[in-house]
Image (cartoon, rainbow, N blue to C red):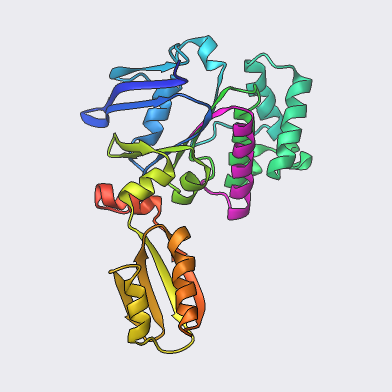
Amino acid sequence: MAILLVKDVVKYFDSRRVLDSVSWRIENPGIYSLLGPNGAGKTTLLSIITGIIEPDGGRVLIKDSKPSNPSTRMIIGYCPQEPGLIGNLSGYDNALFYGRLYGLRSRDIIDRVSKMGEKLGLSRNDLRMKVGKYSGGMKKKLALIISLLHDPEILILDEPTTGMDPGVRREVWQLLLDLKKMSKTIILATHYMEEADQLSDRVAIIDRGKIIVEDKPSVLKEKYGPKTVLQLRFENTINNEVIGVVKKYSDKYYVNERIVKIHIGEPEKYVPELIGELYSHGYRVVEFKLVKPTLEDVFLKLTGRRLE
């Protein structure tokens, strides 16, 4: 039984086709990223999955039920791109408003908000403040907390870390990884390449309303990305003997005085061999680094343009 089945979903806004026969299937708990630039159709697809808007064609099933079914909505937590918070209420009161819609007791709501607030850096004093005084990052944190109040099986997040500083973003990442350990299913729309790469079990890349590829991040990078580049910096100027050693490992290389850059496959296997052989010939490598393919490389390869 699929956790999520999106089949041939089409959506128009006026005469513009925003989603073009999108299909996506999620079988097991984990973190699944929908990676694409702004305007690619991510928010529209999530809005259809959660039942906020209806598709013009195709269907969506969540654990064999339609998202418009009230019982299905109880297993979903949704954190939209623009938090639906009430500015003249405190953080606690916003949580109470939404928590009661799920039938939760006030005492449980306050307790859950306080505990999750501690994890994400929202203190009790912050939660007593009116939300209208919150920064954009604080609003994002509160919206994420509210989406988790009813302990949903499926958490759907639309650009949850936009506007957060890097430190707070990492805290959110850790929270999502902790939820994954609890066998939750997390669907994450993002345009941050690193976010999708670091967190995801699988990534679906969406562009111009179509999912163009979907797989594990490592598989996508291996299949569509460039080879890893090894950069070596030597103590002395590079000579022909060094180049001769390098040629054993790759026919694609670039040399500039003390630096050589090499396209190399299976770096974990061959880099120690290469450096060891250079040292055995008396050539001292003072610095080396590996530049591995990224999901942005994949996006560029498949679409001809950059992700960000």
Numbered range of the magenta stretch: 162-187
Nearest to the observer: residue 265 or residue 197: 265
Viewed as shown, does residue 1 lie left or right of 105? left
| Residue 66 rendering spot, x and y as whole percentages | 43, 12
| Residue 308 rendering spot, x and y as whole percentages | 38, 53
- Magenta segment, principal secondary structure? helix
Residue 216 can be seen in this image: yes
Q: Residue placed at 34% from the left, 80% from the top?
A: 243
Nearest to the observer: residue 185 or residue 86: 185
User: Is residue 169 shown in magenta?
Assistant: yes
Nearest to the observer: residue 174 or residue 235: 235
- Classify residue 43 by image quadrant: top left
**In the picture shown, does residue 295 fall above or below 100?**
below
Viewed as shown, does residue 178 lie left or right of 3? right
Viewed as shown, does residue 159 lie left or right of 98? left
Q: Residue placed at 64% from the left, 21% from the top?
A: 150
The residue lying furthest to the left in this view is 15
**In the picture shown, does residue 138 fall above or below 41?**
below
| Residue 22 rendering spot, x and y as whole percentages | 30, 28
Q: Residue placed at 61% from the left, 49% from the top?
A: 170
**In the picture shown, does residue 307 fall above or below 127?**
below
User: Is residue 84 shown in magenta?
Assistant: no
| Residue 55 rendering spot, x and y as whole percentages | 32, 20
